[in-house]
Amino acid sequence: MRISVAADSLDGVAERVVTALRQRGHEVIRHGALGHDERDDWAWASESAARDVAEGRADQAVVCCWTGTGASIAANKVPGVRAALCVDAYTADGARKWNDANVLALSLRLTSDVVLDEILDAWLEGAPSTDESDRANVSHLDEI
């Protein structure tokens, strides 16, 4: 899978996200502080990764900033993106299952290496629900 990754700084698990995804066999597109010659502010970096998903250059994205909140907000401004700020594996699994989230937002401040691995495992193993009610909720997002 091709996954776009953005971070506004190299603090915390920023670089570890790239390494962990590559170790799992994924191709990584890097943005912000992880990229080259790009603006590394959270809004710009997260937008770039989210646009990769919305425009088909990436299957999913991971966006990171100090709290994860700004990265999530910026990514969710891009039409077709459903970004979820996840602090644990249960939330990541639920975001994929019930929300068909296609962008994972992480806090560089709160996410440890161990928790990162748990979140990535849950996220990458997760799949959207086929339940009619869950699908209706996700479809309704385009109408809002």
Image (cartoon, grey):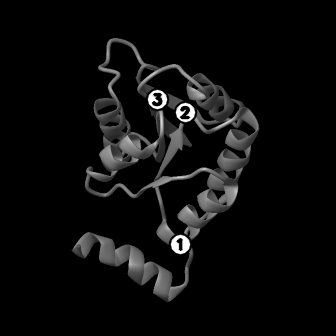
Farthest residue, direction left: 143
Which label number is shown at residue 108? Answer: 2
Callout in the foreground (2, 1): 2
Q: Quadrant of the N terminus?
A: top right
Is there a contact, CB below 8 Å, between mark 3 and mark 1? no
Farthest residue, direction top: 37
Identify the residue position indicated by label 1 in the image: 98
Residue drawn at (56%, 75%) of the image: 129
The three-letter amino acid code for the residue at tag 3 is Ile
Tell which circle, 2 or 3, labels the residue nearer the N-terminal end.
Answer: 3
Residue drawn at (27%, 50%) of the image: 78
Q: Secondary structure at mark 2?
A: loop
**10 Å crowding of disc 3: few (<14), some (14-19), many (20+):** some
Q: Secondary structure at mark 1?
A: helix
Please state the horizontal and vertical placement of residue 14, each as a whole percent of the image. Answer: 56, 27
Q: Quadrant of residue 111?
A: top right
The three-letter amino acid code for the residue at tag 2 is Leu
Q: Quadrant of residue 58?
A: top left
Callout in the foreground (3, 1): 1
Residue drawn at (60%, 66%) of the image: 94
Mark 2 and mark 1: Cα distance apart in space: 25 Å
Please state the horizontal and vertical placement of residue 47, each as a whole percent of the image. Answer: 30, 38
Q: Is residue 121 above or below residue 35?
A: below
Tell which circle, 3 or 1, labels the residue nearer the N-terminal end.
Answer: 3
Which label number is shown at residue 46? Answer: none
Q: Quadrant of the C terminus?
A: bottom left
Please state the horizontal and vertical placement of residue 125, each as a whole percent of the image. Answer: 68, 56
